[in-house]
Image (cartoon, grey):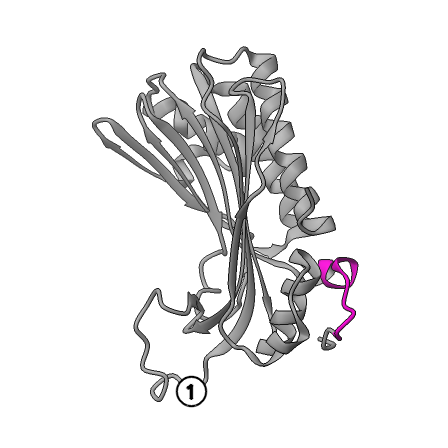
Amino acid sequence: MSMPNAMTTVADILPSWNTAVFRFTVFSTAEYKLGEVQQWWKAIAGSPERDASSQNLGKVLQVAGSTADYMGQIIVQNRQRVDFVFKEPMGTQGGVVGGLGKWSVVRALADKVVNVAVSNLGNVKRVAYAPELVRESTALESVRVIRAYMGGISESWDSTDELSLNINLHRNYSGPGGRINRVVSISIAKVIWGIPVTGGTVEVDLETHKDQKPITRLTIDVNNRQATDDMSVEELKTVSQTCVQFANQFIEQGVRT
C-alpha cells in the first residue's frame, strides 16, 4: 500500500477502506416472533433459517449465522429495537483487519439488509445506518488520512500516534423527526490480535504486544431524530435511504457540511 503524502485526497484513500462491522438498527415498538426473524435471515443470507442458530429469550430474540463472506446477527429487543449486525466470517478474526471486505463490495450487503428491514418492520420512529471502516497504515499515514477526511489539521500534528476526532453534523430536513444526526468518528487505533484498540479505551501492555499494527478507523452513524408518530412505509423507505446517502457521502467525499 502506497503511503499517503501531505496532499492525499479522499479519492486516493477510498479504494483502501475495509469493513470491520456494519450495523443497521430499527427502533420499532412492534412485537415479532422468532419465525419472522428467521425469515429475515433467510432473505438476507439466501440460506435456510435452519442453517442459523436461534434463541428465544423472552423479550429478546436472536438469529445468528454465517456464510463464506460474513457472520451475521439479527437481535430483536421486542417493542424497542432490532439490530442487524455483520462482521468478518469465521476464521479471519485475529488475522485480517476489516475482514468483512472492501466497503465497495460490502455496500451491496448493506443495501440488502436495509431493504429487508424496511420491507418487514413496522411501528418505526427511528433508524440508524452505521458502517465501521478500517485501513492499515502507519501513524503518519493515519494523520494524513484524517486530514483528507476532516480538514483543518496542521502538519505539525504529523508526529502524533494518538488522534481521535468526533463530530455530529446534524441537518434539519422535512421528514419524520425533523433532523438527521450525522455522527462521524475518525481515529488512529492499534490492532492487537485482530482487535482495533483506540488509545485510552483498553489497558494494553505495549511491551508484550510489540507486533501491534496501527490502523485508521472511520466510524459513521447516521440516524434520524425520533419521530413523533410511526412512519408510513414510504416514509421509512425515504428516511432509510437518506441515512444511506449521507453515510456514503462521508465515505466517498469526506466530512462536508
Q: How many marks on residues?
A: 1
In the rendered image, the vertical position of residue 17 relative to residue 4, given as above or below: above
**x and y percent of residue 207 in the render?**
35, 89
6 magenta-colored: yes
Identified at 45% across, 69% down, the residue is: 194
Is residue 180 visible in this depiction of the protein? yes
Amino acid found under the numbered disc labelled 1: Lys
Q: Nearer the viewer, residue 129 or 57?
A: 129
Residue found at the very far left of the displayed protein: 58
Residues rendered magenta in the picture: 5-14
Q: Which residue is mark 1?
A: 210
Identified at 51% across, 13% down, the residue is: 231
**x and y percent of residue 44 in the render?**
54, 34
Q: Nearer the viewer, residue 188 or 107?
A: 188
The quarter of the picture where residue 138 lies is bottom right
**x and y percent of residue 94 in the render?**
44, 70
